[in-house]
Amino acid sequence: MPSEWRTSAGSPDECGSCGGTEFDNDNFCVNCGTRRPASPRHSDIDLDSVAGSSDIGKRHHNNEDAMGLAVADAWCAAIVCDGVSTSSRPDTASSAAAASGIRTMSRELDKVTDFDEAAVTAVLKRAVGAAQAGAALAAGSEVGPNPPSTTLVSAIVSPAGVTVGWIGDSRAYWVPDGDISGAGVLTVDDTLAGQLAAAGVTISDDAPNAGALLRWLGADATDTQPHIHTFVPDAPGRVLVCSDGLYRYAPEPTELAAITHTGTAIDVAQALVSFAVTAGGHDNVTVVVLPYTGPFAAPGSRPEPGAATVPQDADGTDAIEVAEVAPDPADRAGPPGNDAPQSPE
Ligand SMILES: [Zn+2]
């Protein structure tokens, strides 16, 4: 089967405030002046083996989360991006990063013939480079003081195991099909609290700046190399990649595993999104579910959060050509729409 990819990125056809359908070149509604967001309020993407769901929640005006999913015979992959709500037009950064990232990831995975940790890690780095290029371009030609920015978490399920990569505080979890005591979080939040916890130091969530992001993608980001970690499970299960709109209501892996039902990937993704919205829907919520059916490690292999340090390139040359990776509406899968982030003229 040829590889296939889809993204939730794409502006809705109607103005969310007045229902108008005409927008100016800067994507503002000509009727009421509301800016048209870069992602719809709700998305479901079902590629059979891998599926995701994203919802605006109850408190936000826009869905600033975005997702990209891809699948082929030998692998499946996903990216979830959560626009940083304190940046300007965060939806434009998350949608551009998810779309650019998944397109590059799918294309690069198609080229891999021998799936090992090094090959998949290289693909993930290139995809995050493309995501960063997309997020930076969302700022437009004149980068203001607080340009669009986003987190990113990605998982690639392949014959090399489960490879996760991330920047920011969106997470990946491992949920085994059987004994949920084997569940684990595969990422370490790029926050002060997250990094200290990984080093064995616990601070209160109420501590000043405990939850402040240390790293992100966007035009003002200076450190955009992803953390990368490969884990080979010892039994079948699922990888969940999600925004904090989900895990804020069930942060512990066993809590999340306990509410992760068996069923198709799309059923599980929708059920987890519904759980978060019902629990309060304080934030946008996005979940992608990737099944894992082998190969398996020796029994007893435990999921561990990835290293808190960023892997260094062996050759130091992973240059990304921006022109090649900018979202191209004509090349985008999914429903037609004005999907590219709009740059202010
Ligand atoms: Zn309007």
Image (cartoon, rainbow, N blue to C red):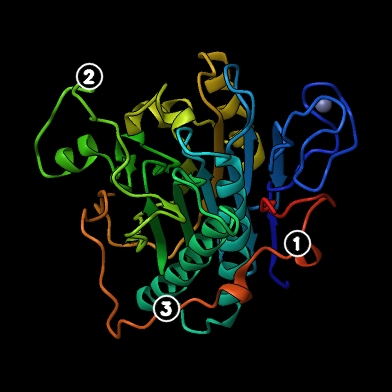
Estimate how packed mark 3 is, as few (under 14), some (14 to 19) or many (20 or more) residues with alpha carbons within 10 Å.
Answer: some
Q: Amino acid at mark 2?
A: Asp
> Depth check: 109 or 303 in front?
109
Position of residue 49 measured from the top left corner of the image (x, y, whole percent): 64, 53
- Asked if disc 3 and disc 1 are in contact, CB closer than 8 Å, the reply is no
Decide: few, some or many residues near mark 1? Use Cα within 10 Å; few <14, some 14-19, many ≥20. Answer: many
Q: Secondary structure at mark 1?
A: loop
Q: Tell me the number on the disc at residue 332.
A: 1
Residue 300: where, in percent of width, then height? 24, 52
Q: Is residue 340 left or right of residue 84?
A: right
**Percent position (x, y) of residue 105?**
56, 68
Q: CB of residue at label 1: within 8 Å of ligand 1? A: no
Relative to 6, is 251 above or below?
Answer: above
Q: Are marks 2 and 3 in contact (CB under 8 Å)?
A: no
Secondary-structure class at tag 3: helix
Q: Amino acid at mark 1?
A: Arg
Q: Name the residue: 48% across, 28% down.
A: 245
The answer to whether 51 appears left or right of 118 in the picture is right
Residue type, mark 3 in image: Ala
N-terminal of the pair, mark 2 or mark 3, is: 3
The residue indicated by pointer 2 is 206
